[in-house]
Amino acid sequence: MLHFVVMRQAQQGCVAYDAIQILQEKWVLHIIHTLLDGPRGFNELGREVGGCNPTTLNQRLARLESLGLIRKTVYSSGLLRSSYELTASGRALQCVIDAIQTWATNHLARETVT
């Protein structure tokens, strides 16, 4: 129990811990990775992320917007449509995603299909 208390105190105020908490939320890195290629509408983003239900996607987008990582633009041309794009802060995560990709390529063995 003491170990848990010491670990918890060490985590408080640690910006790296805070960042990991955000980035480990399911679908967050997938959303950011997709938006690195440019703005997407909600449905297009949902298709490209794949497997994320609309409710969860909406929650993640709202969270990322509240953190200043994405920007939502609403268009009303007959139908209410929205577009999502990364802010400068969100685009700065490119190096994080690149580092993960490089590490995975170098250190994770892929299973071969026989």
Image: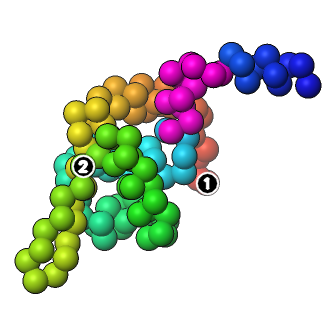
Q: Residue at x 34, y 32 (%)?
A: 93
Q: Marks 1 and 2, Cα distance to the nearest angstrom?
A: 44 Å
Q: Position of residue 20 (x, y in %)?
A: 54, 31
- Work out whether 95 lies above or below 90: above
Q: Residue at x 83, y 24 (%)?
A: 4
Q: Residues within 10 Å of mark 2 (few under 14, many from 20)?
A: many
Residue tagged by mark 2? 71
Q: Position of residue 66 (x, y in %)?
A: 37, 46
Mark 2 residue type: Arg
Q: Residue at x 20, y 72 (%)?
A: 81
Residue range corresponding to the magenta coloring: 11-22
* Main secondary structure of the magenta stretch: helix
Q: Position of residue 98 (x, y in %)?
A: 37, 29
For residue 105, side relative to residue 78 (left or right): right
Q: Residue 45 sits in which quadrant? A: bottom left
Mark 1 residue type: Thr
Residue at the left extreme of this rendering: 77
Q: Position of residue 70 (x, y in %)?
A: 29, 46
Q: Residue 111 sits in which quadrant? A: top right
Sequence-first tag of 1 and 2: 2
As helix, strand or loop, the secondary structure at mark 2 comes to strand
- Residue 101 can be seen, yes or no: yes
User: Which dot marks residue 114?
Assistant: 1
Q: Is residue 38 magenta?
A: no
Q: Nearer the viewer, mark 1 or mark 2?
A: 2
- Work out whether 71 lies above or below 76: above
